Image (cartoon, helix red, strand yellow):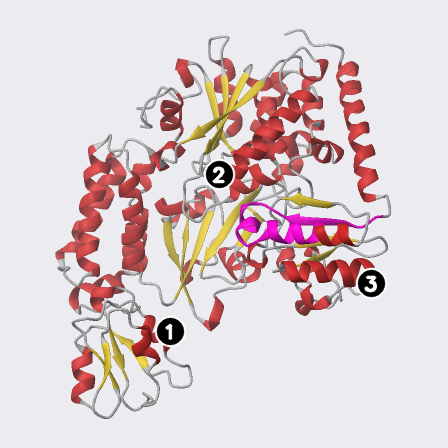
């Protein structure tokens, strides 16, 4: 590779950025208002495209000069669809849960009439300011956005937006120096892989660079198969160029000329926007042959994954890319020395690669100043489950779980109590309230029996049965097992069978010891990390919620009133309103009928435990309850 004079690379990039800045300034400094619509997958699911269409029609109808721009996810998924309006002389105003009718009103009353419509402003009631910004939200004190800083701020389908805010400047800097220097910077930064394993990124790159052979590859792992996790998808949808820039820098560092973004086909919007970003980068000379006139060539293709959970494991991912069933391989050799098509291959997670440009631009010491001793930088979590503020959050490594759940996520809704948090996807652990002051980092979570994983965080309220949660998670991992190794294939099946029996009231006292033994055998004997971590939900629920297992086995009772076989529905005679037949009308199996005095009675033989009757019973009566064990119904009847 023959590089040009560093000044020529700098000049080529400078011209690109100058052109991008011109367009950027025309957008934001023209005096016209600008409307941003959060149109990532979460926004679209909530109706963002209909809102966008209503905004465009109303702007056109009113003859206004006002661009309406699709941006990515802003992180506040609980308030989608989100719309941000920037009007000259006023701060940007963010509106939450916007519908087409509200969208038309915003154009009429704010853009034309100067009424900011405070009743629709997100967070207005929680802030001392009339028009709060995202930085005014209480959660902002705990967040530090690095990977998510561009999400919701730029048009992911317009490369000039990215270049205008210094995008690809890190690449231009790297191309004027030596590859070994880049690897040393990444090593010194302490960046660890964000895909779950937490391996040193710099060490992986160095191993690949030193491996023999002219052909090497960079693979971005965007498979992200964990239920409830959508961090990688969000970055690919909202800021795809940050990942592409990181891949090119990685390729330059290790001597690779080809890269692949492996993304599951179930992410159509992510695929669409990444493919657009790749085409635009090629057109600008930032990807392909002779990047920025430097003499270095690197190109990227998108590989569509088929949705197999095991393909999130790097060796299984490679196997699937080679045209075979996605199954893990024995290691060593590791992909860094023997990967795709037998060539040295670096596989990094989406978030890992997106960090690279920041480290190059802001320096090693800046990155090392964030996080804990052994886990540097920030962690991105997808908050889901029983939590008020669902969505994305980025906090420094080492932030206590309590801050993430209560200060950022605002705790469990409906006044219910917190019970557990499940971290790290279906192979993660379930942690109770007693460990909420645990710092969020790779090592602390591992010691507690959980793991960082890719960043899924599912909060569980007091009404969740931890035995059923363990069964549900194990059912997923057992179904997704590739079946290559016996411990994972048969061990998880046996464990699932035991959990099935326990949740149906058929468990025996010896099942607890058997579950523990099986879980540890599967953990030790499985080939890949997906099999090794599959028992985590069982081990952590046995460790922290043993009393629930004992209640299911010894008392045939589900304390959380969740397991269908261990509960029954009962209508309280003194609360049932004779003139109300709401429960009768909603019962799909006709299990409810009135007695001679018009008090409703549930036929326990017919009841399918769907719970529809509970939700249909008017709140002023609240006459239907769940009881466990089912034999309690007989006690109630005797005491009438």
Identify the secondary structure beneath mark 2: loop
Q: Quadrant of the C terminus?
A: bottom left
Name the residue at the top extreme.
2
Residue stretch rendered in magenta on the structure: 32-56
Q: Quadrant of the N terminus?
A: top right
Identify the secondary structure beneath mark 3: loop
Residue 247 x, y percent position in the rendering: 57, 25
Residue 270 is inside the magenta segment: no
Q: Is residue 338 left or right of residue 327?
A: right
Residue 348 x, y percent position in the rendering: 49, 29
Numbered tag placed on residue 114 in the rendering:
3
Q: Residue at x 29, y 78 (%)?
A: 584
Is residue 104 at least partly visible in the picture? yes
Residue 283 x, y percent position in the rendering: 68, 21
Circle 1 sits on which residue?
Answer: 615
Q: CA distance from mark 3 to mark 1?
A: 43 Å
Q: Check the image and report above or below for 581 versus 317.
A: below
Mark 2 or 1, nearer chain start: 2
Circle 2 sits on which residue?
Answer: 267
Q: Residue at x 22, y 37 (%)?
A: 489
């Amino acid at each position: 590779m023959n590089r040009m004079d560093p000044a020529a690379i700098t000049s080529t990039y400078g011209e690109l950025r100058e052109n991008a800045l011109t367009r950027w300034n025309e957008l934001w400094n023209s005096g016209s208002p600008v409307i941003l619509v959060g149109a990532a997958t979460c926004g679209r699911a909530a109706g963002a495209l209909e809102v966008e269409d209503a905004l465009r029609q109303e702007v056109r109808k009113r003859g206004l000069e006002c661009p309406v721009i699709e941006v990515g996810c802003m992180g506040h998924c609980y308030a989608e669809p989100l719309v941000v309006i920037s009007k000259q002389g006023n701060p940007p105003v963010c509106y939450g849960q916007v519908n087409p009718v509200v969208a038309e009103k915003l154009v009429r009353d704010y853009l034309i009439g100067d009424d900011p419509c405070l009743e629709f402003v997100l967070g207005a009631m929680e802030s001392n300011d009339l028009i709060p910004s995202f930085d005014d939200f209480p959660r902002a004190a705990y967040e530090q956005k690095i990977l998510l800083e561009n999400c919701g701020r730029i048009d992911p389908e317009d490369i000039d937006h990215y270049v205008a805010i210094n995008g690809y400047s890190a690449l231009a800097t790297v191309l004027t120096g030596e590859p070994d220097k880049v690897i040393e910077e990444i090593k010194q930064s302490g960046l660890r892989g964000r895909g779950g394993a937490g391996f040193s990124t710099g060490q992986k790159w160095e191993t690949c660079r030193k491996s023999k052979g002219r052909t090497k590859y960079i693979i971005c792992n965007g498979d992200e198969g964990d239920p409830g996790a959508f961090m990688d998808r969000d970055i690919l949808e909202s800021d795809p160029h940050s990942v592409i820039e990181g891949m090119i820098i990685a390729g330059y560092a290790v001597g690779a000329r080809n890269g692949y973004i492996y993304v599951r086909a179930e992410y159509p919007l992510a695929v669409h926007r990444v493919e657009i970003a790749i085409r635009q980068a090629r057109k600008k000379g930032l990807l392909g042959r002779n990047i920025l006139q430097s003499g270095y060539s690197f190109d990227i293709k998108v590989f569509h994954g088929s949705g197999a959970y095991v393909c999130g494991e790097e060796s299984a991912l490679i196997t699937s890319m080679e045209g075979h069933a996605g199954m893990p391989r024995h290691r060593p050799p590791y992909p860094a020395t023997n990967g795709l098509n037998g060539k040295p291959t670096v596989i990094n997670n989406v978030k890992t690669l997106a960090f690279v440009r920041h480290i190059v631009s802001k320096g090693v010491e800046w990155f090392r100043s964030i996080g804990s001793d052994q886990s540097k930088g920030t962690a991105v979590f997808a908050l889901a489950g029983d939590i008020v503020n669902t969505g994305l959050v980025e906090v420094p490594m080492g932030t206590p779980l309590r801050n993430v759940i209560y200060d950022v996520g605002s705790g469990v809704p409906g006044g219910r109590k917190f019970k557990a948090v499940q971290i790290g996807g279906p192979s993660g652990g379930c942690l109770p309230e007693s460990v909420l002051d645990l710092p969020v980092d790779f090592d602390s979570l591992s010691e507690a029996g959980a793991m960082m994983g890719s960043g899924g965080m599912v909060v569980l309220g007091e009404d969740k049965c931890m035995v059923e949660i363990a069964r549900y998670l194990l059912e997923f991992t057992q179904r997704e097992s590739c079946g290559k190794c016996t411990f994972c294939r048969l061990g998880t099946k046996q464990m699932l069978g035991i959990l099935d029996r326990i949740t149906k009231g058929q468990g025996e006292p010896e099942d607890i010891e058997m579950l523990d033994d099986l879980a540890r055998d599967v953990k030790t004997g499985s080939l890949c990390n997906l099999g090794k971590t599959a028992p985590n939900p069982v081990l952590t629920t046995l460790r922290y919620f043993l009393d629930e297992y004992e209640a299911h086995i010894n008392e045939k009772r589900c304390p959380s009133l969740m397991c269908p076989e261990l509960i029954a529905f009962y209508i309280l005679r003194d609360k049932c309103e004779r003139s109300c037949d709401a429960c009768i009308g909603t019962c799909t199996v006709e299990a409810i009928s009135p007695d001679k005095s018009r008090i409703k009675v549930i036929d326990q033989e017919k009841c399918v435990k769907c719970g529809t009757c509970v939700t249909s019973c008017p709140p002023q009566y609240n006459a239907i309850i769940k009881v466990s064990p089912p034999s309690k119904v007989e006690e109630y009847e005797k005491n009438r």
